[in-house]
Image (cartoon, grey):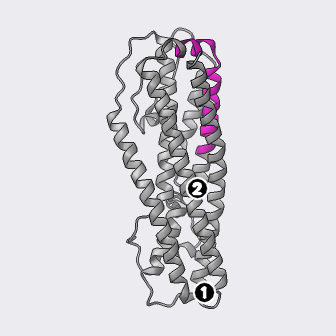
């Protein structure tokens, strides 16, 4: 079987993984988990991202089971000095770095949202003063976005420089390498989607007037709900706030503030869910890396 290149989108088109000479029960399990990831690829909502992170935990469990197999341990130990093993170790470290980046970005956004919620509650009856507090929140978000965009650019550069060459290995070893690379790629893809979602809308959103705030106040059906699912909670809140700042000369009505307050509450709840999933996944990634290092050290 040919090995797949390290491409952030390669798992979208992954073939069914199989061991040609001796199929193993774990292989269908890998296929099933990867299919579950592909099924939710178009949805950018926080609930969908939480689901993807949960699925990644299942994927890491599959890897842990794979690393327990004598064949896997023997192959890794024998090939410890080969480039593909170094690439797997580098990939696991890169995933932990991205996990840490996501944790920091969520923490900063959650703290900023909490401060803003407190300010909104204190300013009941003085809605027109809310713009200054919104500006403080958006300034903190700009710092988060800048850090994420830099990390994603660096990641793209590393991916561009990374090219896997064909390996002269037996079919079972090639399948093992393909599985481990596929897991790394799938996990990397989800982290990229997560970080892009956290970054949300860019400054100077093209939404004008109270259009977005009004949309948030309307009950949505059918196609509108599907479109909304493609927009992350981070982007919804950011765009609504840029709308407020873009209309400083207009009266900020209490109903608008209540709408924003509700959206920020949803955002805080979403962040909490994501933080819990990332914490669990982080432990799984650390466990997998430790297992790899232990195998290679013997």
Residue at (57, 24) in percent of width and height: 293
Q: Position of residue 287 (x, y in %)?
A: 64, 32
Give the mark nearer the N terminus: 1 vs 2. Answer: 2
| Rendering coords of residue 231 (x, y %) | 50, 60
Residue neighbourhood size for the residue with mark 2, other residues' Cα within 10 Å, grouped as few (<14), some (14–19), many (≥20): many
Q: How many residues crowd around disc 1 within 10 Å: few (fewer than 14), some, or many (20 or more)? A: some
The answer to which of 217 and 124 lies nearer the viewer is: 124
Task: List x then y, in percent, for residue 150.
Answer: 39, 52
Q: Marks 1 and 2, Cα distance to the nearest angstrom?
A: 27 Å
Q: Circle 2 sits on which residue?
A: 46
Note whether residue 200 is visible.
no
Quarter of the image with the N terminus in it = top left
- What residue appears at the point 33 percent right and 37 percent down from the top-left corner? 160
The residue tagged 1 is: 254
The local secondary structure at tag 2 comes to helix
| Helix, strand or loop under label 1 | helix
Extent of the magenta region: 53-76
Q: Residue at x 45, y 75 (%)?
A: 242
Residue at (51% x, 39% y) in the render: 95
In the picture as drawn, the residue positioned furthest to the left comes out as 161
Front residue of 197 and 42: 197
């Amino acid at each position: 079987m040919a090995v797949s290149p390290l491409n952030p989108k390669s798992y979208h088109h992954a073939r069914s993984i199989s061991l040609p000479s001796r199929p193993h029960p774990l292989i269908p399990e890998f296929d099933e988990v990867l299919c579950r990831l592909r099924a939710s690829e178009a949805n950018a909502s926080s609930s969908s991202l939480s689901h993807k992170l949960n699925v990644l935990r299942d994927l890491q469990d599959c890897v842990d089971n794979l690393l327990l197999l004598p064949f896997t341990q023997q192959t890794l130990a024998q090939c410890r000095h080969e480039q593909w093993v170094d690439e797997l170790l580098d990939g696991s470290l890169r995933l932990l770095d991205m996990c840490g980046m996501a944790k920091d970005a969520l923490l900063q956004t959650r703290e900023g949202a909490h401060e803003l919620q407190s300010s909104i509650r204190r300013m009941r009856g003085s809605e027109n003063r809310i713009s200054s507090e919104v500006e403080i929140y958006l300034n903190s978000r700009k710092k988060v976005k800048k850090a994420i965009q830099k990390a994603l650019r660096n990641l793209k550069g590393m991916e561009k420089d990374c090219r896997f060459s064909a390996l002269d290995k037996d079919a079972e070893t090639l399948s093992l390498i393909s599985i481990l690379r596929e897991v790394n790629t799938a996990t990397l893809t989800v982290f990229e989607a997560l970080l892009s979602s956290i970054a949300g809308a860019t400054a100077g959103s093209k939404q004008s007037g109270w259009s977005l705030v009004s949309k948030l106040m309307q009950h949505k059906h059918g196609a509108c709900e599907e479109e909304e699912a493609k927009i992350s909670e981070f982007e919804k809140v950011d765009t609504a706030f840029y709308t407020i700042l873009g209309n400083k000369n207009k009266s900020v009505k209490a109903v608008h503030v209540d709408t924003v307050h509700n959206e920020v509450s949803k955002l805080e709840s979403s962040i909490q869910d994501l933080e819990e999933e990332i914490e669990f996944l982080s432990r799984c990634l650390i466990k997998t890396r430790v297992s790899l290092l232990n195998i290679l050290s013997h």
